[in-house]
Amino acid sequence: MSAHAKDPMLPRPFRVEKVKRELSDTFTMELVPAEGGGFSFAAGQFNMLYVFGIGEVPISISGDPGEHERLVHTTRAVGKVSGALDALKVGDVIGVRGPYGIPWPVEAAFGRDLVFVAGGVGLAPLRPAIYQAMANRERFGKVMVLYGARTPEDILFKKEIERWRGRFDMDVAVTVDRATGKWGGNVGVVTNLVAKGGFDPQNTTAFVCGPEVMMRYAAQALEKKGVGRGSIFVSMERNMKCGVGLCGHCQWGTHFVCKDGPVFRYDSIADLFSIREL
Amino acid sequence: MGQPHDLGNIIDAHPFFDGIDAELRTLLVGCAANERFEPGEFLLREGKAADKFFLIRGGTVAVEVDVPGKKPIILETMGEGEVLGWSWMVAPFMATFDARATVAVRALSFDGKCLRKKMAADPALGYAVMSRFVPVMAHRLQQTRMQLLDLYGVDAEGGKKKKKGKGD
Ligand SMILES: Cc1cc2nc3c(=O)[nH]c(=O)nc-3n(C[C@H](O)[C@H](O)[C@H](O)COP(=O)(O)OP(=O)(O)OC[C@H]3O[C@@H](n4cnc5c(N)ncnc54)[C@H](O)[C@@H]3O)c2cc1C
Ligand code: FES
């Protein structure tokens, strides 16, 4: 057993192999283990990324769980540490702890329609589950990706979405709140896409990821359509320190988001969703 | 205009009037017409009489506001299975937005004046129509609120509490 596996607080060094700008404030980083070896994770899990001397932040893994050579993270720079991640260059080394957390229950959804509802940068933590679903395509009914962004310029993974759209075995719908430029697609909030349906509500599992307000409305729209609370999963975020259930920093009601989540079944947290200041 | 029989079938095929009583449906048919709009054609014009509403059967309609000297701002796009327009129910019956076909649109239109008269005379029809429009209006209101909230923006999570969702 390696020292990193033994001590969950000990970061493992990873080298930045590639950086891709996705949006003005969002980038995708590919990392490789500086000391060799691979990296396994399940879709929906996150890592604690440590920029030496600056700090550590939880960031979901946005790559393909079938790929073990490279670790992929998509981050929006919003503050001190995420901003420092944004400033990294190819060859720089950061510390990685993880993978942590409860993943998206992709396999439990075998035999059902699978609907991904994403808002903004929330598409990134869902992408590994989309890859996994498409790698097991024959095991699902319909696979739908419903994605909402603020404007066409804020659409994440644009080229990849285009490729998904081109597939005959996947339904992809994108909507923006505000149309700009030559946008000829849907305008309106992402819940409208849910309302349009196209899936069998009784036999649908839905994975929802985005800002908390968006997830709340999306879950309500899914419920209204007939999808049971027990078949809806959301991915939560709370401020974290240890990432492994030791410090209590990420406590949310009776849950620790780092170890009981970040993916929660909606019926287990729906009540918390409506409690303010929690 | 299509035959009453066809129009009845079209009403049945559209989710908006799902489950409507056959007698009431006959009353609706008397106010309905089948229409087609070419790309760029307007279904409704802001400030003009809102004398119709539409059940969209195919194509896409952009609901938009004209901004002088600029491109219109699209508030929402609507498509098959959706219903467009409720100003025909609200005095002074003026459209509050433009509605433009962005591609060829097939729709069933209903004459507002005709329907208002029938609804006033027959409360059961009035209730059947209103109880279908109120959720549409509530949905529009909620949608507008969500757009104001800027659901995917950093501000959507409000303040410095860091109770963030992943998309913000
Ligand atoms: C399980 C989990 C998974 C996550 N996955 C991702 C991911 O895949 N990609 C990603 O970009 N982020 C993700 N986050 C959010 C990320 O951890 C935070 O954005 C990060 O911790 C912010 O730290 P900072 O030092 O950069 O900002 P700070 O300096 O701590 O904060 C600066 C300012 O930014 C605000 N702020 C903090 N976090 C956010 C936020 N998320 N959005 C908007 N404003 C914020 C603060 O309120 C503060 O005003 C995830 C969080 C969790 C808990
Ligand atoms: S971050 Fe320490 S308990 Fe969750």
Image: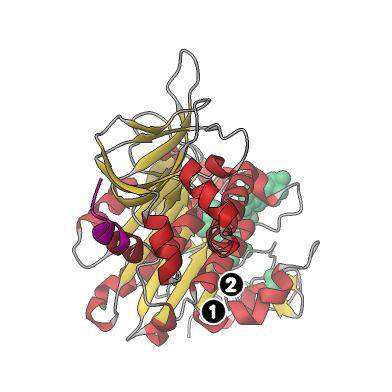
Q: Is residue A138 left or right of residue B57?
A: left
Letter of the chain that mark 2 sits on in the rendering: A
The residue segment tinted magenta is B1-8
**Principal secondary structure, stretch drawn in magenta:** helix
| Depth order, front residue of B85/A116 | B85
Looking at the picture, which amino acid does disc 2 mark? Pro
Q: Looking at the image, which residue sits at the far front?
A: B121
Give the label on residue A209, or none.
none
Q: Say if disc 1 is inside 8 Å of ligand 1.
A: no
Neighbor class of circle 2 (other Cα within 10 Å; few <14, some 14-19, many 20+) is many
Reading the image, the residue beneath label 2 is A262
Pick whichever of labels 1 and 2 is earlier in the sequence: 1
How far across and down, in percent of the image, does residue A19 sit? 39, 46
Quadrant of image for the C terminus of chain A:
bottom right
How far across and down, in percent of the image, does residue A88 sit? 49, 44
- Mark 1: which secondary structure? loop
- Mark 2: which secondary structure? loop
How far across and down, in percent of the image, does residue A106 sit? 40, 79
Q: How many marks?
A: 2
Q: Is residue B150 visible?
A: yes
Give the residue drawn at x 26%, y 61%.
Answer: B5
Give the residue drawn at x 35%, y 77%.
Answer: A113
Give the residue drawn at x 55%, y 83%.
Answer: A230
Letter of the chain that mark 1 sits on in the rendering: A
Give the label on residue A102, or none.
1
Q: Is residue A18 visible?
A: no
Looking at the picture, which amino acid does disc 1 mark? Ile
Height in image: A278 above or below A233?
above
Q: Say if disc 2 is inside 8 Å of ligand 1.
A: yes
